[in-house]
Amino acid sequence: MTITIKTPPPGPKAREAMARDARVISQSYTRDPQAPVVVERAQGVWVTDVDGNTFLDFAAGIGVCATGHCHPQVVAAIEAQAHKLIHISGTDFFDPAQATLAERLTALVPGDFPKRVFFSNSGAEAIEAALKLARYKTRRQYVLAFTGAFHGRTYGAMSLSASKTVQRTRFGPLLPGIIHVPYPYCYRCPFNLERTSCSLACLDYIQETVFRKLVDPQEVAAVFIEPIQGEGGYVPAPDDFLQGLRQLTAQHGILLVVDEVQSGIGRTGKMFAFEWAGIEPDIICIAKAIASGLPLGLTIYRSDERDWGPGAHANTFGGNPLACAAAQATLDLVENNLLRNVNTVGPYIGQRLFDLAEEYPIIGDVRGRGLMLGAEIVADQGGKTKDKESRDALTKICYEHGLIILGCGENTVRFAPPLILTQEEAKLGLDVFATAVRQVTRRG
């Protein structure tokens, strides 16, 4: 397949569908105004809208469709399971499929210690479980999270998040006991330092300011962190920062919770992004890509004598048999071939973006790993002035030319295609993006 634009999008059928949507669907959904794709069907890395336009997908359903849309192995697994069992509720009864998947996942997660899995339906639910579990295990009330973080929209997850005020406005009071600290956003250092000489100032801030002036570390239950901030702008934490954070939390008996909802299941070229730093978290939250489009959230935790007991937490639909079957098929694909593909195609995309940044100063920073890459758009590379208007223009032009791509943060374009993307397909998409960069640069 290839990009095919039969009628300028959104076409007449798409506009009709958008009008219907506007009458009955909650206004709280954002609906990307730059790329109003009205989907009819999708296969692999290709999305066809209701007007017959075919787009190349660099968004993967916000990182969900890691194996591409409707991968035949995933579809076959779902179909086979649907003939046997659709729901039984693993909360009250035993479903061997849950145990089989849990055994596989706990073996994949680094760490030579006992682990257990809590099943839910989404990233936010996985975070909520981690938050409750951390307080239960430690009997401590305070939790640290980072500025720029996005952990979900339910109350606990929202309280941990600090990405955009619109996600928190008019919902207070939020969960008490959450303390936000600076994230190591090295391109825009919160302490105005250079990466080569900052001496991990963000880590020092936790030790010297938070733990000495705000809260005794013996009252802190957990630290939540995304190894690569997703909605915050595809900002990776340096490996030495994650290593230092692991040492600091271990020193004070604080649980380290790693949010792998967007970065996990092969997206960065390893099964989990934290593996690049060689650390072993206490709790890991997984969702999005794990079931290739079916709702599944997982909280994987270090098991010890402080674990919660029966009735402390549960979930009616979590670990649904269809989702577990899809997850097994997804892991088969990721382990057998897709990790290797990410480590081939990801560097190609990264190099193309670096080359564009050399030629066009509106690209201020290129960052990320594997197929989780961000290009931050600025008005000038020297001053690093954020340019949201140009970022939005880029995603709109890409959409008009048949490339689905999303923004994140205030002014970053994210590159998060399905992990099955070939280098030829990557080249096609980057050629479209390069055309958009040239057009926006000329406008400026």
Image (tube, rainbow, N blue to C red):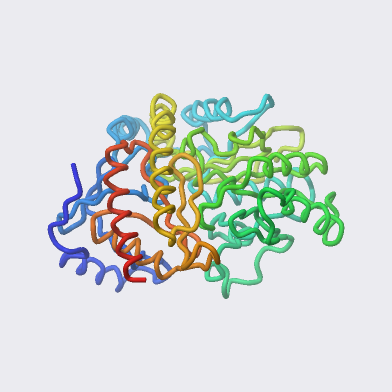
The residue that appears at 53% across and 42% down in the rendered structure is: 286
Percent of width and height locating residue 29: 41, 66
Front position in the image: 165 or 435: 435
Front position in the image: 18 or 81: 18
The residue that appears at 76% across and 37% down in the rendered structure is: 306
Q: Is residue 79 left or right of residue 11?
A: right
Q: Where on the picture, by quarter, is residue 176?
A: bottom right
The residue that appears at 32% across and 71% down in the rendered structure is: 443
Q: Where on the picture, by quarter, is residue 305?
A: top right
Percent of width and height locating residue 382: 54, 63
**Residue 141 visible to an observer of this rendering:** no
Front position in the image: 98 or 300: 300
Is 365 rendered above or below residue 172? above
* Quadrant occupied by the N terminus: top left
What is the count of numbered marks?
A: 0
**Residue 375 visible to an observer of this rendering:** yes
Percent of width and height locating residue 444: 37, 71
Percent of width and height locating residue 186: 62, 53
Front position in the image: 341 or 26: 341
Q: Is residue 277 left or right of residue 411?
A: right
Is 440 rendered above or below residue 272? below
Is 220 rendered above or below residue 161? above
**Residue found at the far left of this picture:** 6
The residue that appears at 59% across and 45% down in the rendered structure is: 227
